[in-house]
């Protein structure tokens, strides 16, 4: 939730401003080199169980590179041999072979990041002549798999080892992952020496879960450089490969376009919306929390002139008065947490961490965003939503939102996420997003819908956004209310008091004026 190391800052730049391939994975060509085909039974002995973890950052007193290894190199930086019941095991199988008659079958037995690694790869050298790795992976269920490539002198600091997580759909998945960024940089570097290990792992697999691997090739194929879109939305996103996104792109040939509620706009991302509306921005009048709530109450009194049966409800944890039938009852229907898919890719603690019980949460860009849900079941079905505002309070004014045309948006979530279990990889225990932090917007069972239910700039320590269209969306009887993800265009940054804040008045609130029907 805090700022990352300098290495992570570099990766952040890549995650918001550099291009990745939009072309589909190309078929194997003559130049592709077969790395592993699993046809020789003797090769099975090269695979051993490992537990993959995030490599620690070296202390300043340590050398910048690892010392020369012993005769047998380590399986992978940040991994350790593990023959415990919680590790993975491997065997050869005649099922799901995609090249020849055999495939590597990996059987998982639970654990956090279990896997297997081969430290005797048949293609040596530093792999600088290759730009991508291709392989076939057949999953028996939705799986978050990963690959880790380690060189002889790979540093053990964050992001230095080549890691790629892969959201697999059940069945066969044809994978192409790039070893280098289109600009040519990346963890696979000649200065780190020969490649010594390939590890294949999974995130919190179930006991008995299986993954078949075959037809592993190294290729000179480079990422296409024909699109300069935010790479978060590309099928080959540098910070997390999703077969679901790739298949959706294969079907449509297009990236998601976000409709903006209350307008006729359709935009590719929040930053584009900010650019389109920049000329309409004016410096806001900064108001206190009390002034904002008083303004909403005055608005309610005006609305009642035309809608005498209108009801004002403030949905804030611990505050009474939201339910006309039980006016003394305190509200307890908020959920909130932080979603993090900040790079570098791989077993990064920030992506795994659940923040559902924190008393404040970070809101920034889509890869470091707030996820929240407000129980609106007290509003009778068919009610007319006359006005609604989302109210958030930040710890401090780290950036002055009154001096820049910043933009924030809310996307509707389609998953029944659990506050104490959600993170960048999963929305509940054992239930994976289809792409990291829910970045799958395809027509087939999306994580989030490509809709901005609300948009607008922040104002100050206390800020409000028009949530009328959002509340209408959740109360029209056509959409389940699984809440929203809230993120910005990078100009503003917020640490927001959560529903667990010890000062009830600073907790987030949704203020709604509705007329029952």
Image (cartoon, rainbow, N blue to C red):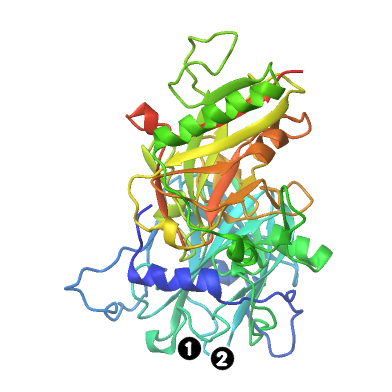
Q: Where is residue 321? Give x, y as percent.
A: 51, 16
Q: Where is residue 292? Give x, y as percent.
A: 46, 36
- Image point 57% across, 37% down: which residue? 389
For label 2, the residue is 129
Q: Which quarter of the figure has residue 483?
A: top right
Specify few, some or many for label 2: CA neighbours under 10 Å numbering under 14, 14-19, or 20 or more. few
Specify few, some or many for label 1: CA neighbours under 10 Å numbering under 14, 14-19, or 20 or more. some
Of the pair 3 and 22, the residue shown nearer to us: 3
Residue 375 appears in the picture as rendered = no
- Image point 60% across, 70% down: which residue? 231
Q: Where is residue 13? Give x, y as percent.
A: 47, 72
Left or right: 161, with 174 as reference point: left
Of the pair 86 and 444, the residue shown nearer to us: 444
| Secondary structure state at the residue bearing disc 2 | loop
Q: Nearer the viewer, mark 2 or mark 1?
A: 2
- Image point 82% across, 64% down: which residue? 252
Q: Where is residue 486? Give x, y as percent.
A: 55, 48
- Image point 19% across, 72% down: which residue? 60
Q: Which mark is residue 125?
A: 1
For the residues labelled 2 and 1, say whether their Cβ atoms are less than 8 Å apart: yes
Residue 207 to residue 333: above or below? below
Residue 421 to residue 49: above or below? above
Residue 313 appears in the picture as rendered = yes
């Amino acid at each position: 939730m805090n700022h990352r190391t300098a290495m992570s800052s570099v990766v952040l730049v890549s995650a918001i401003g550099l291009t990745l391939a939009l072309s589909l994975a190309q078929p194997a060509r003559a130049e592709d080199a077969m790395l592993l085909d699993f046809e020789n039974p003797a090769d099975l002995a090269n695979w051993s169980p490992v537990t993959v973890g995030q490599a620690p950052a070296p202390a300043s007193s340590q050398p910048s590179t690892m010392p020369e290894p012993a005769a047998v190199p380590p399986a992978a930086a940040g991994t350790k041999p593990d023959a415990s019941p919680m590790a993975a095991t491997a065997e050869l199988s005649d099922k799901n072979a995609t090249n020849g008659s055999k495939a590597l079958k990996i059987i998982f037995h639970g654990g956090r990041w279990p896997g297997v690694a081969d430290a005797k790869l048949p293609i040596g050298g530093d792999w600088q002549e290759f730009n991508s790795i291709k392989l076939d992976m057949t999953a028996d269920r939705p799986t978050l798999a990963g690959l880790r490539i380690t060189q002889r002198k790979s540093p053990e600091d964050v992001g230095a080892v080549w890691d790629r997580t892969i959201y697999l759909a059940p069945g066969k998945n044809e994978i192409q992952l790039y070893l280098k960024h289109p600009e040519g940089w990346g963890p696979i570097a000649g200065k780190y020496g020969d490649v010594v290990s390939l590890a294949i792992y999974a995130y919190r697999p179930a006991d008995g879960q299986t993954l078949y691997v075959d037809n592993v090739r190294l290729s000179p194929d480079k990422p296409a450089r024909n699109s300069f879109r935010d790479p978060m939305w590309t099928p080959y996103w540098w910070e997390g490969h999703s077969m679901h996104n790739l298949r959706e792109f294969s079907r449509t040939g297009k990236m998601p376009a976000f409709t903006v509620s209350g307008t006729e706009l359709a935009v590719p991302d929040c930053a584009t919306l900010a650019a389109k509306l920049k000329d309409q921005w004016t410096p806001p009048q900064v108001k206190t929390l009390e002034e904002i709530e008083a303004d909403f109450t005055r608005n309610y009194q005006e609305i009642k002139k035309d809608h005498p049966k209108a009801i004002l409800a403030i949905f804030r944890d611990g505050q009474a008065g939201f339910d006309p039938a039980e006016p003394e009852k305190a509200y307890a229907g908020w959920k909130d947490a932080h979603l993090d898919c900040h790079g570098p890719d791989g077993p990064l603690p920030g992506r795994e961490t659940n923040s559902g019980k924190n008393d404040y949460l970070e809101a920034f860009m889509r890869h470091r965003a707030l996820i929240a849900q407000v129980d609106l079941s007290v509003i009778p079905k068919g009610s007319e939503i006359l006005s609604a505002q989302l109210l958030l309070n930040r710890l401090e004014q780290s950036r002055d939102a009154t001096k820049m045309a910043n933009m924030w948006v809310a996307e509707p979530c389609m998953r029944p996420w659990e506050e104490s279990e959600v993170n960048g990889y999963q929305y509940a225990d054992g239930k994976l997003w289809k792409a990291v932090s829910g970045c799958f917007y395809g027509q087939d069972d999306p994580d989030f819908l490509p809709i901005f239910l609300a948009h607008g700039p922040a104002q100050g320590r206390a800020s409000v956004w028009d949530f009328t269209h959002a509340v209408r969306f959740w109360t029209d009887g056509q959409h389940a209310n699984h809440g929203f993800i809230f993120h910005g265009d990078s100009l503003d940054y917020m640490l927001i008091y959560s529903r667990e804040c010890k000062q009830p008045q600073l907790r987030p609130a949704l203020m709604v004026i509705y007329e029952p029907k």
